[in-house]
Amino acid sequence: MGSTLAMVGATGAVGRELIAVLEEREFPVDELRLLASPRSAGTEIPFRGEALRVEVLSEERLAGCDTVFFSAGGDTSLEWAPRAVAAGAVVIDNSSAFRYEDYVPLVVPEVNPEAALKHQGIIANPNCTTILLVVALGPLHAIAGLVQVTVATYQAASGAGAQAMEELRSQAAAILAGEEPQVSCFPQPIGFNLFPHIDRFLPEEDFATKEEMKVVWESRKIFGLPNLQAISTCVRVPTFRAHSEAVFCSFERELSVADARAALKAAPGVRVVDDPLAGRYPTPREAEGIDDVLVGRIRPDPTRDRGLSLFLSGDQLRKGAALNAVQIAELLQ
Ligand code: A2P
């Protein structure tokens, strides 16, 4: 059975990846409507051998859709997602606009697929860093019960959109040419630099950033653990499209490294890359363009009770965004 799909934000970094993932996974589509702002109307994007023309987002183009993917930022989702639902569509929203609403499921199919079926029109796709984290922690939580997690992240430019990826490229070129880097998308130069500042600082959360709190709030919601102890420091680094995370966690029950490794090896969406003596561990370069989250450096964490530490890398645009959104749509088929 085919369906009518719309993609709001089709010209963006996530939108373009969504189109590629739909094609690769042979998602049943009768009609795909590519929607964006008037800036990019008329742009042609290939899909299944055809050049599809980008159109301006409008009520008319949302009418008659079965599923609408939103990846055009929170303001666009807030304004247009309820209209798409009123017109009869199920919305899969990549922004943070609805993630913390009780009536909106927040879904990572490997971890809480059952939540998707309880939707009332909108399903939220979690933050990219959170998705990668819960894919790795889900199998460990299932056998040992997660109690606490501390995360330091190394996040790629793609999380800030297509223009930000271009800014990394142009700044690196400028610096290598001995010129001053021009900053526009990021709060600091990203070429040959890094900074602990993603999204805005929240005075009411002791000046954690919103990105850091997303990891905390969303992990609690996805695992159904409202009391999960969690903290993260989120750092932007000069990689293009794969995030990495250093993770330190503790569990209710004893969890040996061997049992953790076995659970991760058996888990969908995870690839264990953990042979330090052979120089094998996750890197963002190896994670780019693939579906699995790479997990390695698995070792005990003696600083906490029943503690474990690991390192992961995952493609921010694929599992961190587009692939997860398409997997949610597949759950609804
Ligand atoms: P456009 O190309 O017309 O600006 P990214 O996250 O990579 O920056 O991409 C953002 C996406 O959201 C782009 O496809 C962009 O389209 C789209 N977008 C931004 N603002 C709007 C808007 N007000 N209405 C529709 N699409 C929008």
Image (tube, rainbow, N blue to C red):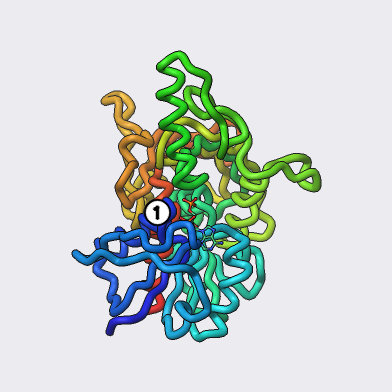
Q: Nearer the viewer, residue 146 or 286?
A: 286
Which residue occupies 31% across, 60% down?
44
Q: Nearer the viewer, residue 288 or 272?
A: 288
Q: Residues within 10 Å of mark 1 (few under 14, many from 20)?
A: many
In the displayed orientation, state which residue is furthest to the right: 204
Residue 35 higher or lower than 294, as above or below: below
Q: Quadrant of residue 272?
A: top left
Image spot of residue 71 (x, y percent): 49, 60
Image spot of residue 300 (x, y percent): 49, 34
Residue 91 higher or lower than 135, as above or below: below
Look at label 1 and name its amino acid: Lys
Residue 12 higher or lower than 93, as above or below: above
In the displayed orientation, state which residue is furthest to the left: 49
Which residue occupies 37% across, 56% down?
16
Image spot of residue 115 (x, y percent): 52, 73
How many dots with numbers? 1
On-image quarter of the N terminus: bottom left
- In the rendered structure, the answer to whether residue 73 lies left or right of residue 206 reads left
Which residue occupies 40% across, 42% down?
241
- In the rendered structure, the answer to whether residue 143 lies left or right of residue 288 reads right
Q: Nearer the viewer, residue 275 or 184?
A: 184
**Residue receiving disc 1:** 319
- Assess mark 1: CB under 8 A from ligand 1? no
Which residue occupies 34% across, 73% down?
32
On-image quarter of the C terminus: bottom left
Residue 25 visible: yes
Residue 139 visible: no
Image spot of residue 302 (x, y percent): 56, 31
SS for tag 1? Answer: helix
